[in-house]
């Protein structure tokens, strides 16, 4: 590549709490960039003057290595998107991502533009392609409308965003307990009906959480519905913590997966919390509590917690 993109990445659309996307650079229309009118012209021509995208070679590169394997068969769609972007933006190095937050970003070089875009945009309509081009290269007056179109597209296709954690986010192997193994044991011990319900939810992930500050209370575990992720407090990774207690906390969090809070306003719920009960009342329904008591070592776990809470808090 003779013309590497400069290190001036512009993040054009991110999901999450950061607020509206920021464009750090003022738009710099270049020769060869086209505007929205031409996109609609392309549509109006009905493709008669443009050969089908499949037959067009692109000048930039296409990279699908970040896309989940099961989606790579959609390369022709990715190629079509690439062709359409190049018609509007000149040479494009297109990288399809599986990002959770950053849906669209670009780096501009002198003669080419590198675009990182979520794979949900494969097969998007001409209006959306036009909006991407407007946002990346258009005049500033077109950017606001372009942003709204892209925002709408992301909203309509957010099911394509994987919220599930990747393997390197998961730390299952502690010093004394491998959470993946304990989780397997707990699932193995479930009543068949519960196991079937759990299977319907799909893979549930587990990880040791981060250490928290303060020693007045501890949340042994939590369950994140969006990410289908159980977090277990690292204070439980001790040789003097019995395996059945870790198993009990995991069982408790699995019950959260099986019995979501009915109000449905919280995306993650309190785990087994030694402090107060205000939040527990919302999520630990009578049905939940009845199921919790069916854990084979329930009484033992309760007794152990009561006898050792101080020690855990002191050493966490
Ligand atoms: Zn709970």
Image (tube, rainbow, N blue to C red):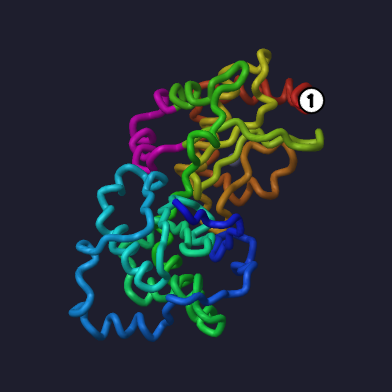
**Residue 185, image x and y in percent?**
45, 22
The answer to which image quadrant residue 149 occupies is bottom left
Q: Quadrant of the C terminus?
A: top right
- Residue under the image location 35 percent in, 37 percent down: 199
Q: List the residue tagged with mark 1.
A: 310
Report the magenta residues as a range.
187-204
Can residue 178 be seen in the rendering of this structure? yes
Q: Is mark 1 within 8 Å of ligand 1?
A: no
**Residue 236, image x and y in percent?**
66, 24
Q: Secondary structure at mark 1?
A: helix
- Residue under the image location 66 percent in, 49 percent down: 279
Please tell me which residue lies in front, 85 or 154. 85
The answer to whether 17 appears left or right of 186 in the picture is right
The answer to which image quadrant residue 18 occupies is bottom right
Answer whether residue 198 is magenta in the image: yes
Can residue 299 be seen in the rendering of this structure? no
- Residue under the image location 20 percent in, 63 percent down: 55
Q: Main secondary structure of the magenta part?
A: helix
10 over 165 or under it: above or below: below
Please tell me which residue lies in front, 196 or 205. 205
Quadrant assignment for ligand 1: top right
**Residue 315, image x and y in percent?**
78, 23
162 over 236 or under it: above or below: below
- Residue under the image location 34 percent in, 62 percent down: 82
Question: Mark 1, residues whose alpha carbon is within 10 Å: few (<14), some, or many (≥20)?
Answer: few
Answer whether residue 200 is magenta in the image: yes
**Residue 256, image x and y in percent?**
52, 42
């Amino acid at each position: 590549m003779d013309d590497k993109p400069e290190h001036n990445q512009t993040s054009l659309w991110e999901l999450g709490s950061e607020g509206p996307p920021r464009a750090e650079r003022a738009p710099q229309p270049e020769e060869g960039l086209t505007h929205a009118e031409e996109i609609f012209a392309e549509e109006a021509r009905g493709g008669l003057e443009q050969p089908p995208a499949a037959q067009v070679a692109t000048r930039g590169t296409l990279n699908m290595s970040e896309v989940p394997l099961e989606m790579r068969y959609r390369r022709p769609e990715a190629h079509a998107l690439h062709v359409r972007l190049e018609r509007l933006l000149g040479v494009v190095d297109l990288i399809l991502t599986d990002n959770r937050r950053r849906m669209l970003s670009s780096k501009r070089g002198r003669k080419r533009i590198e675009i990182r875009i979520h794979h949900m945009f494969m097969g998007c309509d001409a209006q959306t392609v036009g909006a991407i081009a407007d946002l990346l290269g258009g005049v500033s007056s077109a950017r606001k409308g372009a942003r709204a179109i892209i925002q709408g597209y992301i909203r309509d296709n957010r099911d394509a965003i994987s919220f599930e954690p990747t393997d390197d986010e998961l730390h299952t192997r502690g010093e004394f307990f491998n959470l993946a193994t304990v989780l397997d044991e707990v699932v193995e011990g479930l009543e068949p009906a519960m196991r079937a319900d759990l299977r319907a939810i799909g893979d549930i992930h587990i990880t040791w959480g981060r250490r928290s500050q303060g020693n007045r209370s501890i949340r042994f575990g939590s369950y994140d519905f969006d990410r289908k992720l159980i977090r277990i407090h690292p204070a439980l990774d001790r040789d003097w913590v019995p395996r059945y207690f870790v198993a009990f906390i995991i069982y408790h969090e699995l019950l959260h997966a099986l019995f979501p809070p009915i109000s449905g306003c919280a995306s993650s719920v309190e785990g087994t919390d030694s402090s107060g009960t205000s939040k527990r009342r919302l999520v630990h329904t009578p049905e939940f509590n009845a199921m919790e008591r069916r854990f084979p070592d329930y009484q033992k776990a309760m007794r152990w917690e009561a006898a050792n809470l101080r020690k855990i808090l002191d050493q966490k």
